[in-house]
Each structure stands twice: as C-alpha cells, then as structure tokens.
C-alpha cells in the first residue's frame, strides 16, 4: 500500500515549522511542500535590512536544500496551487498537474496588499514581501535619491529608517486610519511620526493619493489632497492580505483567511490551516483572530502538524503577539479592519 | 504543403460547396442541445442570442447587434449596464482551464453605445384582437409583457403607482449605474408600440382590482416588490435607520437624506451595494457593508465588489445584527459574530450566530437592505399569509380567472433580466388564453456555416476591463456621474474576438471518417472522443458518451460539443473533409396566425 501523503501548501515559516514537526512525529508519512515562490525558505522581516545593505543575501535564507533531503521532505518551489478538491482529496496546480493528498496543511501566508483604489497604479509602486521585491528595491536605489513611502505597516517603519540611514532622502505619507495591522490612535501616530523624524524620515501630512503619474524615466509624481510630490521611487506598504482566493469555492470556510478552530482544524478531516492565512476562532472571546509575524506563524505551523498527528493542542490564548515596531508596542493579534 | 492550393482543390467545409440550407426544429432533442452547447444563451432567462450579437460586433454590424439584443431582452442599453449576467457564469471561456468568461454584459453595452438605437417600433404581427389587457406596474416585467401583448394586437393599458415608468430600473437602481436618458429612451421605445401608460395610479387606492377585472379582458399583476423586509430586531424604528429601498427611492426622487459620517449598510445583495455607494456620494465618509456570511458568498459580481472597495467602502463579514442601540436616535448597532455552516443547494451560505458574542459598532446611519416582498392588495383571490395574491410561477395564473401575475411580484425579488423574461412569458400565456393560439414559439434554427476566421491566439486574449471614472474622488463630484465609461470601439473588438462562438456545431460524418485521429491530435482539449456508444435520453438528446480506449470497440469518433471550444483545428486537419460546421441558435419564431395551440 502506498504511504499516506501530507501536502503542505506554502514555504514560509508556518509551512516549514509544520513540515519539521510532522517529520519529528512520524517517518511513515510522505511530506510534500508546494511553494509558489521560487526562493527557499527566507526571513521576510530581514528584507529591509537586506535592501539597506546591512546584511547579505545569504543571511536571508533559513534552511539549506540539503535539510529537506535529510528529512525526506519533498519540496516543490515555483508551483502554484490553483484549486483544492476536498472531496477527491486532490490539488490542482497551475500547470494542470493533479496532486493527491491524504492530509493537508494550508500555510500559504499572505501577499502585499495594494488598496483597490491604487491598483491601477500598481506598476508604479514597489512593495517589499519577497527577495524578488527586495532585488527591485536594490536596483532602484542605485540611482534613486528621493523615496516616498505611502501607507504604513510594520515593515514600512523599519524599512523607511533603514534606507534613510543609508543616506537616501525618505518621505513618508502615513495613513494613520489604514495603518496595518490596526489603525493608529492619535497618540500612537504622533509617537511613530516623532520616531521616524528623529531617524531622518520626513513626514508628509496628506490623507489620500489621487493619482500617480510617471513624469520621466526616474520621476514619479504623486498627486495628493495636499499637493504634488515628486519622487524617484514610491513604495506602497499597506500590510498583507491572506492568499486564500484559490480556496474560495473549495468548500472550506473562507473569510479574510481560512476559518479554523482553536486546534487549527478546518471543517474537513485532516485539513488544517496555520500562519498568516488562518483565521482562528477563539472560544473564550467568541470571535475570530488572525495573527501575523514570523514567530506566531512558526508556532501555528508546529501546532497544526502536531494536531494532524493526533494531538489536541489549542493555540495559546489570548495570543500574546505583541510586536515591537520602532519601539512602539503594537498588538497585532486582532484583526480590526482591512 | 501549399495551403492555398490545398484549400482551392479541397474545399474544407463541405457546406461551402452546396447551397446554404436552413432548418427550424422544435424537437425536444434539439432544444436540449442548445442547453448543453450554447450555455450563455441557455442561461439567459430571455434567451438572448449571445454568440450572434458578439459576432455582429466583431463584424462591425453594431445596429444588428443591438437589434439581436432587443429582440430578446428589449432593454440592451439598460441590461448592458446592470444585468446580473447569468450568461457569464456559464460562459465556456470561464471554465477552469480556459480563463475568464467573455465580457458579455459589457459587450451588450457596446452594442447599445455604438448601435443604432433609434429604431422604429415593430409592427403588430396580428390584426387588432378587440380585447384589452391591463397591466399593473410599469417595471421591467410589466413593460415587457405590454410589448408582447401590443405586438399581438391587444389594447394595453399600464397603470403605474409612481410618477414615472421604469419600476426598480427607475427607482431602485442608482443613476451612477444607469443614466436616466438611456433608460428613458428604451422605455419610450417599448411604449411606442401603442400602449396607454397611466402614472400615479395606485391599485387599491385610486382604482380597485375588482373594477379592473370587470373593465378588462385580463389583468396582469406586475407590481414588483416594494415592501422592505424588517430586520426584526429591537430599535429598528429609531430615527437614523432606513430601509435600503426607501433610501434609494428617496434619492431617485430627488430627496437626499442627511446621513452623517459613519454609515452601516446591513445586507448582502445588489441593493446593499447600491446603498453603500450612494451613501458615499451623499455625504458619508466611512461606509461599511455588514454581511452575515462572507464576501465570497456574495452573489454580487466581482467587478462590483472591486469598484465598491475601490471607492473606500469596507466589506465586513460574519456579523448578524442583534439590536439597534440609541435613545432618541440611532447611535450604534450591536452585532453577533456568526459561524458559517453548510452551503445550501441554491448557493447561499447558511450561518449560525454565536451566542454571547455581542459587539457594538457605532454609526450615524444604518441602512437595512435585506430584501423586499410584494405588497398585499385588497381584492379577490387566494392569498399568502401576508395577503399577497398567490400566482403560479409556471402558468402565471392566480386563483381568479383572467388575473395573471409576472415578475418579482410573483417570485419575490429577482433580477431585471428574469423579470423581463417572466413578463414576456406571462404575456404569451395571456395571448394563448385570450386569442386561442400562440403568436410565437421557440425553435432551434440550424443552418450551414463555415469554420470561423477566429485564430487560436484569440483564445489567449485577456478579458477587457471596463474603464471607469478615475481617480475615485472624481466619481463623487456629482453623485449621478456614471462610473462605468463603456468599452472603446477597439476594446469592443478585442473582447468580441474572445467569444468562442458556441452556436457553431462541429460534427464528424461517420460514414466518411477514416479513423485517422488527426483531429484528436490537434484538439486543444479532450473535446474529440473515441466512443463505443452514444447515450441518449428519452427524447433522443445526446446526454453522454461511452468512451473506450480499446480500438476494436471504437464505433465512432465524436466531437463533444459541450467540451469543444470551436477552434476549427479539426476541420483544418481532416484529410477527408468529413467534419461539417453548422450554426445552431435558439430563435423566437413568429406564428402569424392560427399557429399551434400551445396551451
């Protein structure tokens, strides 16, 4: 009889933690990871430092390919799951290959969010989620002098200060209302602004972007409600959005992320979700929550794998996922708005 | 091989060498075939001939394209903007491995934008019948019924309670989605077929149903659904709480309410989205749509959801309203968190509120748009528990002789295209009953055709996006500015190229097939099959194939037209020209007089 197979969708912290934990539980299981990006497992929170030249590319990566070989984990990169057929226990990949599975852990993470109103200007905006994004920044920064950061999320704060310290002129248009993962209060916003100013980032008071126009090869003009800003590069930092569109008609409950219970179970047997893409029900609070961040994702990946192997571990409650961003403590455990 | 010589010596399409032939069939097997093979036309409640009108646009025959639409759905300019697009969900191009559906609705608008819309009214197909019909309600169902009845030679009077014709088109759909001049023009064309429209006449107040039944040979209730469903929660009567319908109707009548900054819209349908977008245009700055289920369970088109978010409206899921909070006026809404449960067969997601999960969202205005029902009317007949006359949705009859019903009034809220189709079917039923015979029938028109000039590369053209007013701030300058700008002629042509033209039917003549299987080699997907036998249903329609991989069991090579994407490669490659092409369309035939009695 063929060995049972667990497929893990994703190659981020949750997916890797799940794979490792699963292998620790059993050697009797085929483990296959399917990651959409072509990069091996990396640390996204180090990308700002990498762009600023503070660390090398090698420092980004966590696990060498030999690790997977040693653990007998099959890893497939650059392959996208487009459909999950839960009744047939099959995945369909974008190149039409069908992959059967017995158990499934969905840990596909999130992608950079561009607000709908700015999506038509997407090609003028740089984001920072993957090493490929970082490469685009590095290329751009070779000749760019002025950089405008719009939006506001946790990454943007460290990124703005990192490139300011690298000698670039950085302006920041902070959208407090839509700060990700939760809107900033007046006090918190003032605090963030002061900290940024101290580190050499210029804060621009404007609340919305009307239009972006490429004026020349290296100048983009941003039309805001308080005036025009010309800049060499424009970075959009509006947080992450779970990558769950491909699951919408699968039968899984999907809202912002995949709805799971406190054991990270979906409504289907042996199907779990973990990390940024999971929206977790909290029985005491009687509400759903989403956590973000590398460490939370790893923790959840591990728990999903342990529960898949017969455990009944609940995710820590209430999640103490307090993040330190520029010295400001931000509680990111609650999904307030998108 | 020299392609031109080959073509000249062996005409690819056998039909080319013979005079063109056309057949009409009303055989159930042929009608079934349309359902399987031309999914768009079959999905349209009014059976709009989608491939034909898209092909006309490609050929730059815009007026014909407009007319093909009008024949079926009467209001192409309106539907090209606001149709719920059941056709697009069935479009073969939208099958998982084939990409996105064709922009059928946007192309309909192109037909209206570029076609000649100033067409003279059609002539009646029959002499005056000396009979009169009263239609209650000048909405899409009533107007559509009136059109067919007038064409069939009846005297038609339409009574409208509101001050203008159009029903929900006029009062329910915001102007930024449907400009009033487009609407007025298409309504006028329908009215020009010789009907009397009396506005401001409300049945039950100005006239009574009993009197109408005495005065007319038949009465058709097409009064729509104008009674808002209540939330049935505490505090619903507080000032600051509107029903969605009242809100949109007030705005349509020029009475814009004052909203405050924070607006919550409770509901998940088109009306909820319209309310939210209107609220933003009438002064609110922070608008959220609150759903019991999730954004992914919505039936609203993806483009609509995207445009709504683009305007800055938030869509919040998994919350059920529990209580309206306020002393003299609305201050907040209390919600319960919900848990999604099973998916119902109709595609709706059931949710269960989670007890003791209350949370409060402050707001200045709450708009409740959770649906509408028909209005109870005093008068005769079998009624439901709310006092609404019961109408059989199949026969369009009530328990009262000569009293019929059509549109949303009989079914509850549906879509404009369903209301139009319902009105037209009800009209046929009235014609049959009053005149003793039908005036029209649906038939399958089958004629010889050529393989298309479509190129395989056209199958990879990306779906055109509807241009809209941008940036979004510009949309708010005047609340009535139409957001969708319509395709340019170039976009129309590109999008029209994407249609597979599923009305073409490819068939292998088994008497001439040499089983070389070249066609299978070039087929873009599993559309050509080696079969042992063909499965027929009781009326003789093909419903399946018994495929085989064992060569000695192969009795035929068959093109499965439900899988075929009409690329024509098989015809081009066939060495013995045994693959023929025909054009198969569902058409409404006029029966001038004395046709078959269809009752």
Image (spheres, rainbow, N blue to C red):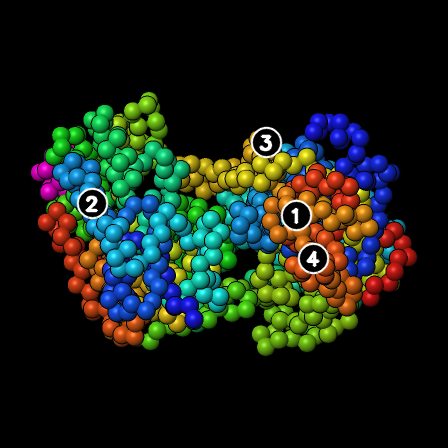
Q: Label 2 belongs to which residue?
A: A60
Q: Label 3 belongs to which residue?
A: B489
In terms of image quadrants, where is residue A336? bottom left
Spatial CA distance of label 4 from label 1 is 14 Å
Tell me the tag on residue B551.
4
Asked if residue A195 is among those painted magenta in the image, a careful observer would answer yes
| Mark 4 residue crowding within 10 angstroms, few (<14) / some (14–19) / many (20+) | few
| Mark 1 residue crowding within 10 angstroms, few (<14) / some (14–19) / many (20+) | many
Q: Nearer the viewer, residue B209 or B331?
A: B331
Q: Are marks 1 and 2 in contact (CB under 8 Å)?
A: no
The answer to whether B315 is drawn above or below residue A259 in the figure is: above
Q: Nearer the viewer, mark 3 or mark 1?
A: 1
Magenta highlight range: A193-202
Q: Nearer the viewer, residue B100 or B65?
A: B100
For the residue labelled by badge 1, is the local secondary structure a helix, a strand or a loop?
Answer: helix
* Lateral position of residue A185 relative to residue B150, left or right: left
Spatial CA distance of label 2 from label 4 is 57 Å
Mark 3 or mark 4, earlier in chain = 3
For the residue labelled by badge 3, is the local secondary structure a helix, a strand or a loop?
Answer: helix
Asked if marks 3 and 2 fall on the same chain, the answer is: no
Q: Label 1 belongs to which residue?
A: B520
**Subunit bearing disc 1:** B
Q: Are marks 3 and 4 in contact (CB under 8 Å)?
A: no
Question: Residue B113, how many percent across, how many down?
Answer: 61, 36
Q: Residue at x 75, y 31 (%)?
A: B7
Quadrant the C terminus of chain B occupies? bottom right
The answer to whether A270 is drawn above or below residue A150 in the figure is: below
Spatial CA distance of label 3 from label 2 is 50 Å
Quadrant the N terminus of chain B occupies? top right
**Subunit bearing disc 4:** B
């Amino acid at each position: 009889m063929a060995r049972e197979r667990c497929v893990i969708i994703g190659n981020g912290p949750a997916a890797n933690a799940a794979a490792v934990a699963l292998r620790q539980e059993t050697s009797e299981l085929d483990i296959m990871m399917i990651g959409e990006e072509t990069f091996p497992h990396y640390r996204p929170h180090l990308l700002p430092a990498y762009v600023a030249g503070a660390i090398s590319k090698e420092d980004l990566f966590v696990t060498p390919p030999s690790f997977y070989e040693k653990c007998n984990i099959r890893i497939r990169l650059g392959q996208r799951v487009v459909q999950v057929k839960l009744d047939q226990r099959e995945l369909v990949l974008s190149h039409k290959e069908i992959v059967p599975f017995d158990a499934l852990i969905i840990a596909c993470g999130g992608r950079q969010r561009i607000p709908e109103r700015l999506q038509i200007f997407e090609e003028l905006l740089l984001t920072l989620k993957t090493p490929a994004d970082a490469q685009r920044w590095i290329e751009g920064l070779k000749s760019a002098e002025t950089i405008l950061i719009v939006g506001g999320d946790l990454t943007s704060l460290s990124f703005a200060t990192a490139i300011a310290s690298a000698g670039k002129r950085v302006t920041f248009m902070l959208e407090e209302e839509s700060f990700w993962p939760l809107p900033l209060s007046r006090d918190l916003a003032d605090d963030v602004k002061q900290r940024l100013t101290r580190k050499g980032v210029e804060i621009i008071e404007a609340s919305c972007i009307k239009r972006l126009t490429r004026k020349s090869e290296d100048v983009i003009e941003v039309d805001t409600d308080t005036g025009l800003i010309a800049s060499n590069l424009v970075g959009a930092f509006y947080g992450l959005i779970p990558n769950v569109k491909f699951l919408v008609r699968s039968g899984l409950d999907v809202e912002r992320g995949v709805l799971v219970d406190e054991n990270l179970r979906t409504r289907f047997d042996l199907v779990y979700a973990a990390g940024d893409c999971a929206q977790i029900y909290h029985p005491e609070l009687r509400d759903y929550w989403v956590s973000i961040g590398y460490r939370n994702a790893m923790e959840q990946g591990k728990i999903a794998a342990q529960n898949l192997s017969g455990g009944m571990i609940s995710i820590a409650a209430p999640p103490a996922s307090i993040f330190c961003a520029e010295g400001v403590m931000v509680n990111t455990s609650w999904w307030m708005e998108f | 091989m020299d392609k031109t010589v080959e073509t000249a010596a062996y005409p690819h399409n056998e039909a080319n060498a013979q005079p063109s032939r056309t057949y009409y069939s009303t055989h159930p097997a042929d009608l079934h075939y349309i359902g399987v093979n031309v999914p768009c036309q079959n999905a349209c409640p009014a059976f709009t001939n989608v491939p034909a009108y898209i092909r006309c646009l490609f050929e730059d025959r815009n007026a014909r394209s407009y007319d093909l639409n009008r024949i079926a759905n009467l209001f192409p300019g309106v539907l090209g903007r606001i149709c719920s697009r059941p056709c697009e969900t069935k479009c073969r191009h939208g099958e998982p491995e084939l990409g996105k559906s064709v922009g059928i609705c946007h192309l309909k608008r192109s037909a209206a934008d570029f076609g000649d819309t100033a067409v003279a009214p059609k002539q009646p197909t029959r002499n005056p019948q000396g009979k009169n019909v009263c239609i209650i309600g000048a909405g899409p169902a009533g107007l559509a019924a009136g059109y067919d009845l007038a064409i069939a030679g009846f005297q038609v009077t339409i009574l409208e309670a509101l001050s203008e014709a159009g029903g929900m088109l006029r009062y329910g759909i915001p102007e930024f989605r449907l400009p009033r001049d487009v609407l007025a023009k298409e309504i006028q064309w329908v009215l020009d077929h010789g009907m009397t429209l009396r506005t401001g006449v409300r049945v039950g107040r100005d006239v009574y149903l009993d009197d109408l039944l005495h005065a007319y040979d038949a009465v058709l209730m097409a009064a729509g659904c104008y009674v808002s469903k209540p939330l049935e929660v505490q505090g619903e009567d507080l000032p600051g709480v509107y029903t969605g319908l009242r809100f949109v109707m007030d705005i349509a009548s020029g009475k814009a309410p004052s909203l405050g900054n924070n607006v919550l819209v409770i509901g998940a349908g088109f009306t909820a989205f319209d309310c939210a977008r209107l609220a933003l245009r009438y002064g609110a700055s922070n608008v959220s749509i609150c759903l019991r289920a999730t954004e992914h369970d919505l039936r609203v088109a993806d483009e609509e959801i995207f445009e709504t978010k683009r305007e800055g409206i938030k869509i919040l899921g998994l919350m059920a309203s529990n209580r309206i909070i306020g002393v003299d006026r609305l201050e907040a809404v209390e919600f319960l968190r919900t848990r999604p449960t099973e998916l119902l067969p109709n595609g709706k997601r059931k949710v269960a509120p989670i007890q003791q999960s209350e949370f409060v969202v402050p707001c200045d205005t709450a708009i409740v748009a959770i649906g509408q029902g028909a209005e109870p009317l005093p008068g005769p007949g079998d009624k439901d528990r709310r006092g609404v006359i019961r109408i059989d949705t199949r026969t369009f009859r009530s328990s009262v002789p000569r009293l019929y019903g059509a549109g949303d009034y009989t079914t509850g809220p549906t879509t404009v295209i369903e209301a139009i189709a319902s009105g037209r079917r009800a009209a046929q039923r009235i014609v049959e009953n009053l005149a003793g015979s039908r005036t029209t029938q649906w038939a399958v028109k089958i004629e010889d055709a050529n393989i298309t000039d479509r190129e395989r590369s056209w199958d990879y053209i990306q779906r055109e996006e509807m241009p809209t007013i941008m940036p979004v701030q510009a949309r708010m300058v005047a609340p009535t500015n139409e957001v969708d700008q319509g395709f340019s002629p170039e976009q129309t042509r590109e999008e029209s190229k994407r249609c597979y033209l599923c009305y073409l039917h490819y068939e292998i003549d088994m008497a001439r097939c040499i089983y070389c299987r070249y066609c299978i080699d070039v087929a873009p997907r599993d559309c050509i099959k080696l079969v042992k036998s063909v499965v027929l249903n009781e009326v003789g329609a093909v419903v399946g194939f018994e495929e085989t991989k064992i060569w000695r069991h192969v009795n035929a090579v068959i093109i499965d037209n439900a899988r075929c994407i009409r690329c024509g490669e098989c015809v081009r490659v066939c060495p013995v020209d045994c693959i023929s092409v025909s054009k198969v369309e569902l058409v409404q035939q006029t029966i001038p007089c004395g046709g078959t009695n269809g009752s």
